[in-house]
Structure formats: structure tokens, C-alpha cells
Image (tube, rainbow, N blue to C red):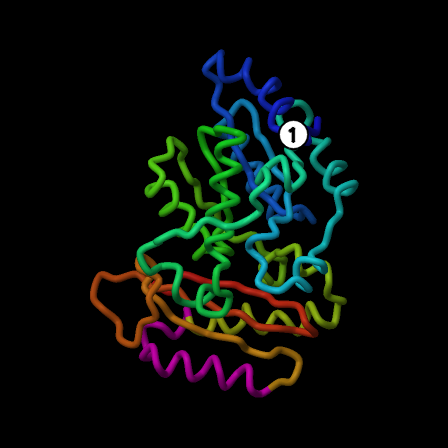
């Protein structure tokens, strides 16, 4: 069942809310894959009804070209979701239904977690993310919302947005879904051929190496090793490899006792930008 506007969506949701049933939200930009279905499967364990939103958000793209190229596979997405039956419905609004007449991002103060990594390379990106998720929360009014840890910085941003707006929704982070060989599943992977997907496995190997050597090597050495690994091949262009405090997301240069760290990487292959991350300790 698919809804294209908030009015008909809420007509469908109202009986569930009246009955006190828990409603889960899985926000997506479509081009669904196994990573998305893993979020839906997690949500089905906790909620009576799941709303999967499919909306390519214009305010989080820094380049018009990236927005234009983002894969749109609505027919395939609907077919995949239909297999879940009546417990999963789709909210696929147009821009006006979600944003109204003002298609612009709010300006947020996320306390600094928006500055590093993705924020440094994509100015304004997280304002767009915070805005669209806030609007989706208003439209759906879910009890719980599910996000993958592949976009770990985004997950922390959304948690901060919920805190800032004092929203009554639980944000649930779910483990990264990976291919058998370890590549993080992403809608952008659909733009790559098999050779490119094989080359992209370097991202995963780089993260695994940092994790395995984290207790033995300093942060600076681990970062140098990662950059050297990328420099040995021509297929991927490294944008950044950063080890950061998992809580503050600020880049780290030295390990602090009792702190948790994650490695974050972004790289380009034939014009397609891929990101990934991994807990190190």
C-alpha cells in the first residue's frame, strides 16, 4: 500500500494510533537493497506497522548533478516491499507535500558533530538531513525510527535533532549490512559494475586492517597506513580516512583511556562516492 500525501497516510495510521499500536518508520531515498530490508526486519520485531518512506531529499545534496544521478527505482522498490504484506506501507511524497512552499533546509546547531568528516566535505548536508527527517517525523509521528550505522555520523545527527526538538520518538541504530565480501551495501553501489565493486572492497580491507591493528599502532600511524594503501592503486580516490571519537565524532590523534573510536572513510570510484565506517575498540 502506497501513500503519496500526508492526509491519506494519516487516515491509514489513525486506527493503529487509536489502538495504541506501535508504529515504526524506516526513512529511505529508495533504490532499496538488503541493507534497507534489514532495517525493516528489525522494525517489524518492535512494531505493529512499519512506514517506509521513499523520498530523494533535494536539500541534502551539495551538487545538483548528484541529485540528478541518484538512482530511482520505484517500481522495483514497491515490488520488494509488497512481499511484506499489510504490515509495511509506503509513504512516497512529492517535494511539495513534505516541504510545502519552502523547499529549504533549517539551520541547526548540532553542537559540533556536524563539522567533521561528511560535514567538512559536504557543507550544509546535515542541515538538509535534519530538516527532512524532522518533516518525516511530523508526517508519520512514529514511535520508533530505524537508521543504519553505515551513515554513523548521520545517525548521531538525527539523535541530536530529536534532542533539540524534544521529539517523542526513539531512534534505533542498526548494524551495517554488508555483502559476503564485506562491502557496505549502498544504493550507490547500483551505479558500479562488477570490476568496480571488486575494487571498492579496498575500503573494507582498509577498515579491517585499522581494527586489527588498533591496539598495536598509534592513530597517526594507522591513518598513514590507510592513506598509503589507497595510494598504491588507481581505481579509488581517497577523500578522507579519519579515526574519531565515537561519541563526539571529533578526529583523534591520540588514544584516550575508556574512549571508544571509529574509523571513517570516504572514497570515489568512477564518479561514485562511497562511505563506510567501523568500530575499532
- Residue extending farthest to the left is 257
| Front-most of residues 182 and 276 | 276
Q: Can you tell which quarter of the image residue 204 is in?
A: bottom right
Where residue 280 sits in the image (x, y, percent)? 38, 65
Which residue is drawn at the image coordinates 67% and 46% (left, top)?
Answer: 30
Which residue is drawn at the image coordinates 33% and 66% (left, top)?
Answer: 250
Which residue is drawn at the image coordinates 31% and 56% (left, top)?
Answer: 111
Compared to residue 110, the image places residue 272 above or below, namely: below
Side of 129 relative to 54 (left or right): left
SS at mark 1? Answer: loop
Q: What predominant SS class does the magenta segment belong to?
A: helix
- Residue extending farthest to the front is 101
Where residue 101 sits in the image (x, y, percent)? 59, 40
Q: Quadrant of the C terminus?
A: bottom left
Q: Quadrant of the N terminus?
A: top right
Where residue 102 sits in the image (x, y, percent)? 56, 44
Q: Is residue 161 magenta?
A: no
Compared to residue 225, the image places residue 163 above or below, namely: above
Please rate how many residues cluster around mark 1, counting C-alpha atoms within 10 Å: few if below 14, some from 14 to 19, many from 20: some
Q: Can you tell which quarter of the image residue 74 is in?
A: top right
- Residue extending farthest to the right is 75
Compared to residue 171, the image places residue 20 above or below, namely: above
| Front-most of residues 84 and 121 | 121
Where residue 19 sits in the image (x, y, percent)? 49, 12
Q: How many marks?
A: 1
Dot 1 corresponds to which residue? 5
Q: Can you tell which quarter of the image residue 178 is in?
A: bottom right
Magenta region, residue range? 211-232
Amino acid at each position: 500500500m502506497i501513500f503519496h500525501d500526508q492526509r491519506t497516510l494519516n487516515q491509514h495510521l489513525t486506527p493503529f494510533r487509536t489502538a495504541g499500536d506501535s508504529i515504526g518508520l524506516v526513512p529511505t531515498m529508495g533504490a532499496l537493497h538488503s541493507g534497507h530490508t534489514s532495517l525493516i526486519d528489525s522494525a517489524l520485531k518492535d512494531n505493529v506497522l512499519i512506514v517506509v518512506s521513499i523520498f530523494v531529499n533535494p536539500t541534502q545534496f551539495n551538487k545538483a548533478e548528484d541529485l540528478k544521478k541518484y538512482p530511482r527505482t520505484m517500481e522495483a522498490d514497491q515490488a520488494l516491499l509488497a512481499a511484506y504484506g499489510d504490515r509495511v506501507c509506503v509513504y512516497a511524497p512529492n517535494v511539495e507535500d513534505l516541504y510545502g512552499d519552502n523547499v529549504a533546509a533549517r539551520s541547526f546547531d548540532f553542537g559540533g558533530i556536524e563539522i567533521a568528516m561528511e560535514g567538512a566535505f559536504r557543507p550544509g548536508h546535515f542541515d538538509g538531513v535534519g530538516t527532512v527527517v524532522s518533516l518525516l517525523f511530523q508526517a508519520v509521528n512514529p514511535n520508533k525510527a530505524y537508521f543504519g550505522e553505515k551513515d554513523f555520523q548521520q545517525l548521531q545527527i538525527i539523535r541530536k535533532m530529536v534532542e533539540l526538538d524534544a521529539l517523542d520518538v526513539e531512534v534505533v541504530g542498526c548494524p551495517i549490512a554488508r555483502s559476503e565480501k564485506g562491502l557496505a551495501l549502498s544504493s550507490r553501489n547500483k551505479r558500479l559494475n562488477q570490476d568496480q565493486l571488486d575494487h571498492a572492497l579496498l575500503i573494507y580491507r582498509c577498515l579491517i586492517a585499522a581494527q586489527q591493528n588498533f591496539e598495536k599502532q598509534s592513530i597517526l600511524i594507522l591513518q598513514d597506513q590507510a592513506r598509503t594503501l589507497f595510494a598504491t592503486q588507481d581505481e579509488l580516490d581517497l577523500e578522507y580516512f579519519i579515526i574519531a571519537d565515537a561519541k563526539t565524532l571529533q578526529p583523534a590523534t591520540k588514544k584516550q583511556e575508556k574512549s571508544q573510536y571509529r574509523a571513517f572513510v570516504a572514497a570515489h570510484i568512477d564518479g561514485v562516492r562511497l562511505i563506510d565506517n567501523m568500530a575499532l575498540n
